[in-house]
Amino acid sequence: MSNTDDPQEAGIKASAIAWARTMYDLSGWVWDHTGGKLASGAESTEATAETAMQKMRARMDPRPVKTVVPPGASAQEEAAIDQLFADLLDHLDTHAGSEDLTQAKQMFVAVVNRVDQAKQDIAQRALDAKKVELSDRLKAIPFSTEVTDAEARAFAKSRSALSRVIAGATDLSKLEPVEPALTKLEKAVTAALSTVGPRQQAQDQITAARSARDAMAKVVDRGYYKAVTDAIAAADKALRAAKTASEITSLRAALKAVMDKEGDARAYAAEYESKSLKVELYLSVHAPDPDRDNRSPAHAAWIALAKSAAQKSAALDFSGARAELAKFETHSAVSGDGANVSGCGSFAAAYDSFMANYDDKRLFIKGSKIRGAGAMDADLAAARKKGICDKDWAAAKTLLEDLQDKIDKLHPVAVEWRKIYPLTSSLGSSDPLRQAVDAAKSKLNSDGSGDHAAAKAALTGVTGTERKRAATLARLAAVKKRVEGIDTSAFSAAHSHANGLVSGVEGDIPGDLDAANTGLDALEPKLDAIEAWMPLMTDARAARALQDASDTYGFLDDAITEAGKNDYAKARTKAAAALTNYQLLARYQPLRAQVTGVRDCQTSGTPPYDMVDAALTEAHDLATVQKDLTKAITRLQQVLADPALAELAHEIGLWQQQYPRVKKQHDKITTVMEPAAAKKTLTDAMAAVEDKANTDHDYPGAMELLETHRQALVAGRAYVANRKRAKSLKKALDRAVATFSGVPDVEQKLYGHTDDSKLRAAMKAADDLAIAGKVADAAKAYAALLTSWQGFAKETAKLHEAADAVGSNAGHSIDRHGADVTDAELLARLTTGVAPDGKTSTTRASSKFDTFEAWLQAREEGAAMLEQKSHPGSSDTIKVSDTSVPADVNAVVAMKAEIDHQGPIDKAYVGVKPAPGVDPVKGKIGKGDTYETYEALDGITRSQTLWLFEIDFSGLTIPPVGHVSPPDFRHKGDPKAYIDIYTTEHGAAPASIPGKWVMMQLFPLVDKWNQELQDYET
């Protein structure tokens, strides 16, 4: 097949020939169909009188399309094209008789080329105009730092992408997708901006709700507290997901509905407290638990009713909650004991009333040191004991009423006593003030009874002059106390100055009270100024250390100068100004860093670079030379008037904020990551992130990489935690196989095979994945491995727990903190004191391990820590399997340690508000050791273990002087007790002390856990 047989190619060739024929025909040539070639008019078989020039001229009318001025041409372009065409016509007319078309052809091509150029220019102008139009629309889209970070980043990403498309477009078709994308972005930004106000209002509402919850934490009952906590969490989650104002309005309404019930909740809580006290009195005195590990039917009934009432109040049904509580007195376990219930209730009501109306006055009297003050505690204790211990509730109420009467009479005397008594410590017995105090004291008895009116009269009967002296002395004492309150380490000069002023006034008191009071009148405002200056100065110093450690700006210099002159009023003003400047500096410095980043993102020497650089220079001068940070900030903000630059600055700000956090997390993970080769993927990725920001100054790109790396670190953390747990678990299995070698088929039970070869192979395969850069897959592999070991871990844990449960150690870790413990059991321990193993064990933190693998990891790592220790004077390390320790009072017999699991192991509940408690033996009423409200925690990453060497006292019988019998737990880990007893029985010290190591305690560590930060507070 020849080339011409291709239909497509033949068509293209025919089009080209047709165009060529047209061009030559215009130029005076014709196509010779017979010869199949171009021929000039002169070669035509038919003679003609027209010249080639004339023929071409004839073809110029009408004007060929290719020479017509295109639509959209400028006046200049139109004139130029028309002129070229006119020149062509003139040439054709002038040389009509010529057969030489060379110049005419050239002139024709020039017209066509100029038309084509005009078309190109018109298209370029249209493209440029469209680019300007679209760019202006893009710039017109506002930027706001008040939208969420996620929204700001999404908008910045869209803006950058659109900007790139607009800038790179070579024809209008490339811009067609831009307009709908712009419209979409405009709508998204408008929608986001419309939620800024509602979002901030919602955030403020959530913040206020948190504050309100914290304020009511020790007031309301557990049900409403949970309702508030859940409502805040739901609102917070909904706000993060909200896209529209209506969604925000909805979540705010839901939160408000719960928070609006606070008044009702407080009223119910007061009733609940009163009811709880009444019930606790009854349970402690008339229906006590048979022992610490068993509940009386009445106690069990109250726990059930209180739980049901909490569920009602959590649903904001306070009427229903009250109804549940009311069922206690009619419950079958209580109804037959109505007289005692009524008696307890009557006393409880009287006691509540006393505490609400008289206890503050009682404490005031107690603190006054007036005669009878010591009876305040004793009388109250007597009333409580009369009811609680003697069960004489009527007499108890009478004692409370007697105490109230005594307080009513003694309190007015104590008020006057406090005005004079503190001034008399250095006065002689002949001093009128001292005599008034002594006279009042003589009218009172040690139990607070006496002639209260006479006592008060003695105190108020001091003469005018003596009263004036008393008042002056009181003023002086108050001034001295204020001077003592000046921190000598931070404000020694101010303290010395104030002391000097006090000394001057003090010297005037014996002889000239008026002069002393005049001095005090002058001194007190000076102290006011010093006291007003000190906190500002403290804050300003702290701000300087944080914002200007090298004191480059010297904002505090003026305040220091004025303080040196003892003009603390001016010093306060200067310190306030300095603090304001440091606050401005806290805004200026990150803003400058952002704008510097913006400049570095521009090409050096270009107008954008020079513009930003000039602004930085001006701002620096304003800040450091003129010390006008407000203007410096304003100057930098002018740079960010361009939304694109503002968004870039926002990205830089996010980078400056988030990079240190991710870097800290990265370092924490890679520092402990093994094998070393597994780190390479993460370290290379972090280096790429840093290079993108610090070398390329591509902050949007750096943020993209940083977010990707953050996700990679999640997998990295999981890998580190899972691998660490698997390694410890493998060692624990190895230890168990050795320890319990006598158990039939122990390898099969704990390894799932005749040996550990399969386990080692699986761990190596997971490590190989990490080394190959597949960290997430490696984390999953270890997780799967741990899951497959769950049975082995549980079996091993129970073997160890059983072996540890000897002597004084109950072996309760798994029963109280193991993976099989339920949330309900954790809460029951906190709110009722009953541990998951059924025994009474109150606690403020009720926690559990989420898996047996985590429990066993903690035990193994604790054992490994113990085996790094040595006894005094020995180079040999301790072994968990040791059956003796040296006969040395300093022998290592205990080890407490914290285990860092590198990942979450636990959930827990921590008590907030203690429930009321009653001591039926001592007759005390107060806070109990269970909790009414609590916080739920998760994500905990540490555990605490306690290992003890359980000394075997079984061969000894005679306790030495000063020691109780050997079964006493206090001596189970006491080498001295064993040595003393052994020496007493055998006449010589033992060669060693027998026993065994046991794990006494193991539980997730809740102390200092910050639920919001998901980390421990340092």
Image (cartoon, rainbow, N blue to C red):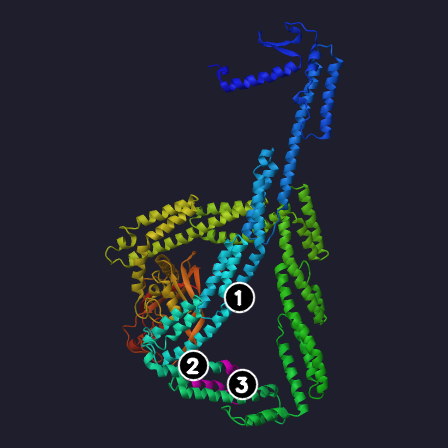
Assign a secondary structure to mark 3: helix
Residue matched to label 3 = 365
Viewer-side residue, 312 vs 942: 312
Circle 3 packing at 10 Å, graded few (<14), some (14-19), many (20+), is: many
Residue 860 falls left or right of residue 560:
left
Q: Is residue 377 magenta?
A: yes
Can you name the residue that lies furthest to the left here? 744
Q: Which of marks 2 and 3 is nearer the N terminus?
A: 2
Height in image: 219 above or below 505?
A: above
Residue 723: horizontal and vertical position, in percent? 39, 52
Mark 2 is on which residue type?
Ala
Viewer-side residue, 199 vs 770: 199
Height in image: 106 above or below 318?
A: above
| Foreground: disc 2 or disc 1 | 2
| Foreground: disc 3 or disc 1 | 1
Q: Is residue 921 visible?
A: no
Mark 1 is on which residue type?
Ser
Q: Is residue 232 visible?
A: yes
Residue 883: assigned label: none
Residue 294: horizontal and vertical position, in percent? 32, 73
Viewer-side residue, 289 vs 993: 289
Give the CA separation, mark 2 to mark 3: 24 Å
Which image quarter: residue 872? Answer: bottom left
Give the CA separation, mark 2 to mark 1: 32 Å
Residue matched to label 2 = 348
The magenta segment is 356-384
Mark 3 is on which residue type?
Ile
Which image quarter: residue 847? Answer: bottom left
Q: Earlier in the sequence, mark 3 or mark 1?
A: 1
Residue matched to label 1 = 211
